[in-house]
Image (cartoon, helix red, strand yellow):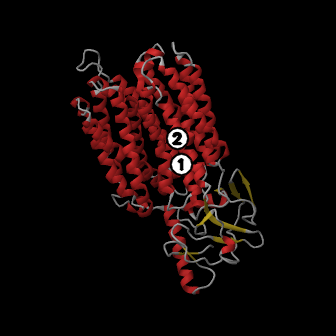
């Protein structure tokens, strides 16, 4: 079979492999009993049945038999190898990546932007919002806090939904975003004042939407991308969420110049959210074939994933990740109240929040492709975490300088370190937890961050100084609390690989791909230039078994 007959204008090739495991009884059970596999019909002649992209293998199912594998050589790095596994007389299985994956990734990115903007619709203008809804700033803070707690309430449902694929999760988020935004506007339609209870109900609905898109990037990148692009894809969709927060911090203060403008701001955000959400119903559910070896690896069931979650190394990442995400949520929500007592304006606070996020996005855009190639996940984590703790310590004194340069510089450095950490930590969790399905660790990590973020907001609000303080209502005690806990968390990820546990840090998904390349390289060297070898963009040879 010729090379031209196997290529299309739409598809980039990827190396196929067999499903090998070194993960013990859980991985074996996952292989034999439960597999997440978006391969279409005709992929196997064995006893099996599929449902919503899941392949359930009958007891005693064996690997597919290989009758033919065409050789494909001299592919560029951008076009990885394309191979077909012939399965007797039942057609073939191909491993490919598809250009249509970008449509779903862009849509997931848009939803993460808009859901985070929904979160911070009111916090940047808390004083005007308090007047408009005839309440106080502490009550307005609960709009952001309830949004975060909503994540925790629904995250078990999110895990189950994502286990069946990212599209059902994305559609669920779109429905909740549409409903939540227009309910918020129903409670804010009059410029003379709003109905706080109605707005809170709509805010909770948008909060319920967040886990369905915030936890989806690792699941989506595992399903659609190879190991050469997963970190970047996860970074783009995950970091879109704080980018939405930056838009909220920056744009909303310009929309609202007085209490009556809150109504218009809620309307504008509802319109933008609706436009962003509607394409969600038209994205492809799954690729016709998996992107590569690890993408087609059977995943552990939810019950077995709970047992895999007992790994100490996973928790040494989950805990600091949740703490720092929680502090980011707290700082983003309260930055206006942190800076205003020292004479800064709402615009100054909005720009500071935007710098925190935009500089972080730029830093992540630089580091993510590098880490995609080097896989230096552990080094990146051990560099970023101490820098984050140090920034929270220094920030205690920045508002008191009453000079805008100090907060801008420290928040920019904090953003760069924090945002570089997010995709690395999420992908490293997937590597350590393999064959656990990616959404399992990512959803738990984000749920921890949202839960702690809500708790930190409540604690910080309680630590706010009174009207007799200097300056009145300052949040110095809240900043001290943040710094102390951030520094206490630093040693946890630094302990990774110590005390004779370095072998626990193996990159299991990457190892699966490398094992296939090594095996196929040996096969190719023994068979010369026969038709059983495939050369990838790096000169490595792969076969399918």
Image quadrant assignment for residue 61: bottom right
Say left or right for 314 vs 41: left
Q: In this image, 49 relative to 38: left or right?
A: right
**What percent of the width, then of the height, locates residue 416?**
35, 47
Image vertical order of residue 375 relative to residue 337, above or below: below
Residue 217, disc? 1
Residue at x 28% of width, y 41% of height: 409
What percent of the width, then of the height, locates residue 341?
A: 29, 23
Q: Nearer the viewer, residue 420 or 362?
A: 362
Q: Residue at x 75, y 63 (%)?
A: 42
Q: Quadrant of residue 85?
A: bottom right
Q: On screen, 439 above or below 37?
A: above
Decide which of tag 2 and tag 1 comes sooner along the chain.
Answer: 2
Disc 1 crowd rating (10 Å Cα; few below 14, some 14-19, many 20+) is many
Q: Residue at x 46, y 13 (%)?
A: 134
Q: Residue furthest right?
A: 89
SS for tag 2?
helix
Label for residue 112?
2
Q: Is residue 310 visible?
A: no
Foreground: 505 or 219? 219
**Contact between labelled residues 1 and 2, with CB atoms less than 8 Å apart:** yes
Residue at the image position 40 percent from the left and 50 percent from the top: 364
């Amino acid at each position: 079979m010729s090379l031209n007959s196997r290529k299309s204008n739409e598809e980039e090739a990827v190396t196929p492999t067999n499903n090998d495991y070194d993960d013990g009884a859980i991985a074996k059970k996952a292989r034999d009993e439960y597999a997440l596999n978006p391969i279409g019909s005709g992929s196997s002649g064995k006893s099996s049945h599929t449902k919503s992209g899941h392949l359930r293998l009958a007891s005693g199912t064996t690997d597919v038999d290989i009758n033919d594998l065409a050789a494909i050589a001299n592919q560029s790095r951008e076009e990885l190898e394309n191979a077909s596994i012939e399965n007797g007389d039942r057609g073939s299985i191909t491993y490919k990546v598809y250009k249509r994956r970008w449509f779903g990734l862009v849509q997931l990115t848009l939803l993460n932007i808009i859901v985070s903007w929904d979160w911070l619709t009111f916090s940047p203008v808390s004083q005007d919002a308090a007047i408009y809804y005839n309440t106080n700033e502490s009550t307005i803070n609960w709009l952001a806090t309830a949004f975060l707690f909503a994540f925790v309430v629904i995250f078990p449902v999110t895990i189950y939904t994502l286990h069946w694929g990212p599209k059902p999760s994305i559609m669920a988020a779109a429905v909740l975003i549409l409903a939540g935004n227009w309910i918020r506007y129903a409670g804010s339609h009059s410029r003379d004042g709003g109905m706080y209870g109605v707005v809170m109900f709509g805010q909770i609905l948008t909060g319920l939407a967040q886990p369905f898109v915030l936890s989806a990037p690792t699941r989506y990148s595992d399903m659609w991308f190879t190991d050469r692009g997963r970190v970047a894809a996860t970074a783009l969709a995950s970091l879109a969420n704080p980018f939405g927060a930056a838009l909220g911090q920056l744009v909303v203060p310009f929309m609202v110049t007085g209490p009556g403008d809150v109504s218009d701001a809620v309307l504008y955000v509802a319109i933008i959210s609706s436009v962003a959400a509607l394409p969600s119903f038209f994205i492809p559910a799954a690729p016709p074939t998996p992107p590569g070896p690890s993408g087609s690896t059977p995943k552990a069931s939810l019950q077995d994933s709970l047992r895999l979650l007992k790994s100490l190394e996973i928790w040494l990442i989950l805990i600091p990740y949740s703490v720092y995400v929680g502090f980011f949520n707290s700082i983003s929500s309260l930055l206006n109240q942190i800076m205003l007592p020292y004479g800064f304006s709402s615009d100054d606070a909005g720009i500071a929040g935007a710098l925190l996020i935009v500089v972080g996005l730029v830093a992540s855009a630089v580091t993510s492709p590098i880490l995609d190639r080097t896989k230096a996940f552990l080094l990146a984590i051990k560099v970023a975490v101490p820098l984050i703790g140090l920034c929270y310590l220094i920030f205690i004194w920045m508002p008191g300088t009453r000079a805008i340069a100090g907060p801008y510089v420290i928040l920019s450095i904090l953003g760069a370190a924090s945002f570089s950490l997010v995709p690395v930590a999420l992908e490293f969790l997937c590597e350590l937890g393999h064959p656990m399905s990616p959404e399992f660790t990512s959803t738990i990590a984000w749920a921890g961050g949202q839960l702690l973020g809500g708790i930190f907001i409540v604690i910080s609000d309680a630590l706010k100084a009174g009207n007799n303080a200097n300056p009145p209502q300052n949040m110095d005690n809240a900043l001290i609390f943040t710094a102390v806990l951030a520094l206490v968390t630093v040693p946890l990820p630094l302990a990774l690989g110590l005390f004779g546990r370095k072998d626990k840090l193996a990159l299991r998904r990457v190892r699966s791909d490398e094992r296939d390349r090594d095996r196929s390289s040996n096969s190719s060297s023994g068979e010369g230039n026969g038709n059983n070898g495939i050369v990838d963009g790096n000169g490595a040879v792969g076969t399918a078994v």
